[in-house]
Image (cartoon, rainbow, N blue to C red):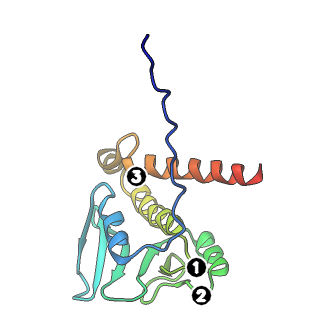
Amino acid sequence: MSTTKPEQATIKPPPSDAPLSALEIVRFLDEFPGASSSYPFGPGAQVWKVRGKMFALVPDDVDPPTISVKCDPELAIELRSEFPSNVSGAYHMNKKHWNSVISDAHVPGYELEDWMGHSYDLVVASLPKGDRIALIGPATDWQRMRDKRQRSVSESQHEDLD
């Protein structure tokens, strides 16, 4: 008589509420398809671009870590209202389209990841169609990760209601 072990359910950790470290921010930005970083403004401010268009700026050696991201103008205003001590118009940038975010305990890591993804999306959407298709194809890994994370958040919120 053979016995088989029942399959154990995989328990997925919920998205992290912990703030992102500078290293986590850099690693996340580096994962976007076609993303490259450089120091076009000189030392001290690392810039991420896709196809030559900037989507993020991270000052070096700032504690807590700070990042400037491109943002839909209406969302930019919403985020500044929701996180007044952490989100503001980005320094030396068009404040209508750019937010500066301080990554600390007031900004959950998954939120900041979404904002970085939103910034990338805005820039990619502005690229010529051929460049967009060549760059991201049907669905990128980070989009799948974002979708999976959003489903996990929805499921955990649903469980909280039960």
- Which residue ends up furthest to the right in the rendered image? 162
**Residue at image location 28% in from the left, 79% down from the top:** 46
Element at label 3? helix
Element at label 2? loop
The one of 5 and 67 positioned closer to us in this rendering = 5
Q: Amino acid at mark 2?
A: Ser
Q: Amino acid at mark 3?
A: Trp
Q: Amino acid at mark 1?
A: His
Mark 1 or mark 3, which is nearer the start of the sequence? 1
The one of 33 and 133 positioned closer to us in this rendering = 33
Q: How many marks?
A: 3
Of badges 3 and 1, the one in the foreground is: 1
Which residue is disc 3 drawn over?
A: 142
Element at label 1? loop
Residue 61 to residue 143: above or below = below
- Going by the image, does 162 lie left or right of 137? right
Is the Cβ of the residue at disc 2 closer than 8 Å to that at disc 1? Answer: yes
The one of 122 and 19 positioned closer to us in this rendering = 19
Instruction: Give the spatial CA distance, label 2 vs label 1.
Output: 8 Å
| Residue 79 image position (x, y, % from top left) | 61, 75
**Residue at image location 48% in from the left, 30% down from the top:** 7
**Residue at image location 43% in from the left, 78% down from the top:** 68
Which residue is disc 1 drawn over?
A: 106
Mark 1 or mark 2, which is nearer the start of the sequence? 2
Q: Which label is found at residue 141?
A: none
Other residues around mark 1 within 10 Å, as few (<14) / some (14–19) / many (≥20): some
**Residue at image location 31% in from the left, 54% down from the top:** 33
Residue 18 to residue 135: above or below = below
Instruction: Give the spatial CA distance, label 2 vs label 3.
Output: 28 Å
Which residue is disc 2 drawn over?
A: 85
- Specify the quadrant that holds the N terminus: top left
- Which residue ends up furthest to the top in the rendered image? 1
